[in-house]
Amino acid sequence: MSDNCCSCHTKHRSDDERKKLINRLSRIEGQIRGIKGMVENDTYCVDILVQSSAVSAALTAFNKELLNNHIRTCIVDDIRNGEDEKVEELLALLQKIIK
């Protein structure tokens, strides 16, 4: 089994990968707090919707990065190690997240 993934469903990320993901999430968290403040301050709906759309795009970018990392490490490594059922796991995941 790969050094990055194991059958207990954990992933050992590099420091760089972890840092990039945490930074993205921190920015999204800040955006969410900003939207909350806008609602609390009765900001015009259009302005809130624009910010909400930006958060949605940021979360989509986070998901793409995480999925790319997952495919390049966990899925590829597991298939190389003979765990062909990982293809079905990936297909099931894609069914859940692509709607």
Image (cartoon, helix red, strand yellow):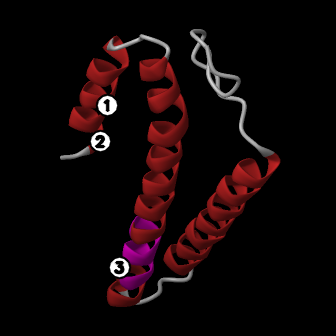
Residue 15 location, x and y as percent?
81, 48
Element marked by disc 3: helix
Residue 11 location, x and y as percent?
65, 28
* Amino acid at the residue labelled 1: Leu
Residue 78 location, x and y as percent?
48, 20
State which quarter of the image contains the N terminus: top right
Measured along the vertical axis of the image, is residue 5 above or below residue 23?
above
Within 10 angstroms of label 1, few (less than 14), some, or many (20 or more) residues? few
Residue that carries the numbered disc 2 in the rendered image? 97
**What is the total number of numbered labels drawn onto the structure image?**
3
The answer to which of 99 and 80 lies nearer the viewer is: 80
User: Looking at the image, is mark 2 or mark 3 earlier in the sequence?
Assistant: 3
Q: Which residues are magenta?
A: 50-56
Residue 55 placement, left or right of 23: left
Q: Residue at x 38, y 84 (%)?
A: 50
Is the magenta region chiefly helix, strand or loop?
Answer: helix
Q: Is residue 55 magenta?
A: yes
Q: Are marks 2 and 3 in contact (CB under 8 Å)?
A: no
Distance between mark 2 and mark 3 Cα atoms: 22 Å
* Amino acid at the residue labelled 3: Leu
* Amino acid at the residue labelled 2: Ile
Residue that carries the numbered disc 1 in the rendered image? 93
Q: Farthest right residue? A: 15
Element marked by disc 2: helix
Image quadrant in which you'd find residue 92: top left
Residue that carries the numbered disc 3 in the rendered image? 49
The answer to which of 88 and 36 lies nearer the viewer is: 88
